[in-house]
């Protein structure tokens, strides 16, 4: 079944992803599929839980274009050493059409692995640092608007309410699985790639 981008308030978006311990051909294929979805919807990054996979992996390309820049596939990312701060507008493929000003560190260090198991250890600055922080937030169950101030968040409330209404409607018609089924699916993915299951979310 092809991957698709899930929208707020789908519960997998609030799920804290566990580190990946196994890489196989299927995982590599899903990572490539995530990149294609990201390009298709004009994004610059996409986290695994945005396609309903509870795995600690994201893809990004700050150019947002298939034939430009360098695409990244990062497994088990961690960020530290924040420096400075900067405020800029962010959006999200899981809440299309919704934007807000988010304050983040201007520079961070990213650590993780690529699909071949090579270490990633880079200090990032500016836009790419923001993209990576946004995606790592996703893997920790955090949406960009969680980091906005009360005033900015008030401006988004109506839009977010519409997403919640639409989601409830889709669950009511059965086009989105119920919470128990979704939790079971997440547990199956975790057993396959993270070596265990979680009891939360």
Image (cartoon, rainbow, N blue to C red):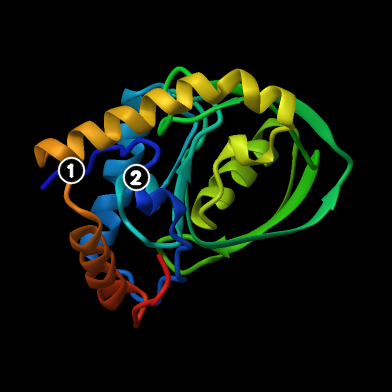
Q: Residues within 10 Å of mark 2 (few under 14, many from 20)?
A: many
Residue 7, horizontal then vertical, whole percent: 35, 35
Q: Is residue 19 visible?
A: yes
Measured from the top left, where is residue 141 in percent x and y? 51, 54
According to the image, label 1 marks what residue?
176
Would you name the residue on which mark 2 appears? 10
Using the image, determine if residue 155 lies above or below residue 32. above
Tally of marks: 2
Residue 188 is left or right of residue 159, and the answer is left
Q: CA distance from mark 2 to mark 1?
A: 9 Å
Q: Position of residue 154 (x, y in %)?
A: 64, 23
Q: Quadrant of residue 17?
A: bottom left
Q: Residue at coordinates 25% horizontally, 57% vertically from top-left?
A: 179
Q: Residues within 10 Å of mark 1 (few under 14, many from 20)?
A: some
Q: From the viewer's side, name the closer residue of 8 and 51.
A: 8
| Sequence-first tag of 2 and 1 | 2
Front residue (pair 114, 40): 40
In the rendered view, would you say 6 is above or below 160?
below
Secondary structure at badge 1 equals loop
């Amino acid at each position: 079944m092809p991957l698709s981008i899930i929208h707020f308030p789908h519960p997998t978006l609030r799920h804290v992803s566990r580190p990946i311990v196994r890489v196989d051909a299927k995982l590599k294929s899903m990572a490539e599929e995530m990149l294609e979805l990201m390009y298709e919807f004009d994004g610059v990054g996409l986290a695994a839980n945005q396609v309903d996979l509870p795995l600690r992996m994201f893809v990004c390309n700050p150019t947002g274009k298939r034939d430009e820049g360098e695409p990244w596939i990062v497994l088990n990312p961690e960020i530290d050493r924040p420096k400075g701060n900067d405020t800029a507008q962010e959006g999200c493929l899981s809440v299309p059409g919704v934007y807000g000003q988010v304050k983040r560190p201007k520079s961070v260090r990213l650590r993780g692995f690529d699909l071949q198991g090579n270490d990633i250890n880079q200090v990032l600055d500016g836009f790419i640092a923001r993209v990576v922080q946004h995606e790592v937030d996703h893997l920790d169950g955090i949406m960009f608007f969680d980091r906005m101030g009360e005033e900015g968040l008030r401006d988004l409330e109506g839009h977010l309410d519409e997403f919640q209404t639409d989601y409830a409607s889709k669950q009511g018609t059965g086009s989105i699985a119920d919470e128990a089924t979704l939790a079971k699916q997440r547990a199956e993915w975790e057993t396959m790639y993270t070596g265990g299951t979680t009891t939360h979310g």
